[in-house]
Amino acid sequence: PRVHGDFSFGKRGLVDGEQEDIALPGVQFKLSGVSDYGTDVLMYATSDSSGRVYFPNIEKGKYKLEEVATAAHYIIPNHTWSVLCDGNGNVTVTGDDLLSTSDGYVLINEPLHKLKLRKVDETNRTMPVAGAVFRIYGTSDSGRPVDLSVTSSVNGVVEFELESGTYILQETQAPQGYKLDSTRRAVTVLTDGTVTVDGLEMITAAESEVYV
């Protein structure tokens, strides 16, 4: 008879500024490869409400596990995991961002980190400015290219969600009646969610202020 094994793991996400992580439901994984018996294997599974993912009845062999869709506000890892079902039906998983706990394996996701700006009038800092377009571009620490543009809201708020990395922030379009400030500002985003923007005043722990 052919040897088969079942395996499951937890999917959890880190939270900026917190020591604990949270369960991530709705994350989709793909398991692929060829079993030791020559069977082509292609299976999909999605994490349940508790963040648990199940792959039942896989044949003896070595496979690749890949995250193909993740939860909102989280980053899809740019690496895969190796899954081995041995001759006794025991399954082991190896790779990065992986914990082995008393409850089994847990795969961890890094969240997207928020950069929040507020565009205000230079002579009246209580007056928000809507309609300013800001562009942020560069390369994340994982090597992904980033190029995003956001327009300030009626409250003057501009918000980006970013992977850790180093970027350039620039205003590319000024609202009517205002002069464009095309200064290029370096932005650094750390994996713990710390964000710094050169040349901008930080007015709260999570918000920087841009003058017109």
Image: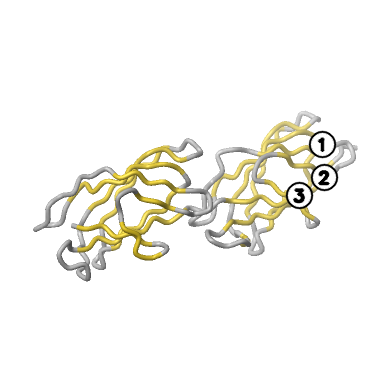
Identify which residue is drawn at 59% across, 56% down.
13
Secondary structure, mark 3, is: strand
> Which mark sits nearer the N-terminus, 2 or 1?
2
Q: What is the three-letter code of the residue carrying label 2?
A: Gly
Where 130 falls versus 160 (above or below)? below
Disc 2 packing (10 Å; few <14; some 14–19; many ≥20): some
Task: For mark 1, give the secondary structure.
Answer: loop
The quadrant holding residue 207 is bottom left
Q: Amino acid at mark 1?
A: Lys
Measured Cα–Cα span from mark 3 to mark 1: 21 Å
Colour convention: secondary structure
Spot occupied by residue 14 in the image (x, y as percentages of width and height): 58, 56
Give the residue at mark 3: 100
Which is in the foreground here, disc 3 or disc 1? 3
Front residue (pair 193, 80): 193
Question: Circle 1 sits on which residue?
Answer: 60
- Quadrant where the image shows the C terminus: bottom left
Q: Crowding at label 3, few (<14), some or many (≥20) Cα neighbours within 10 Å?
A: few
Say which residue label 2 marks.
5
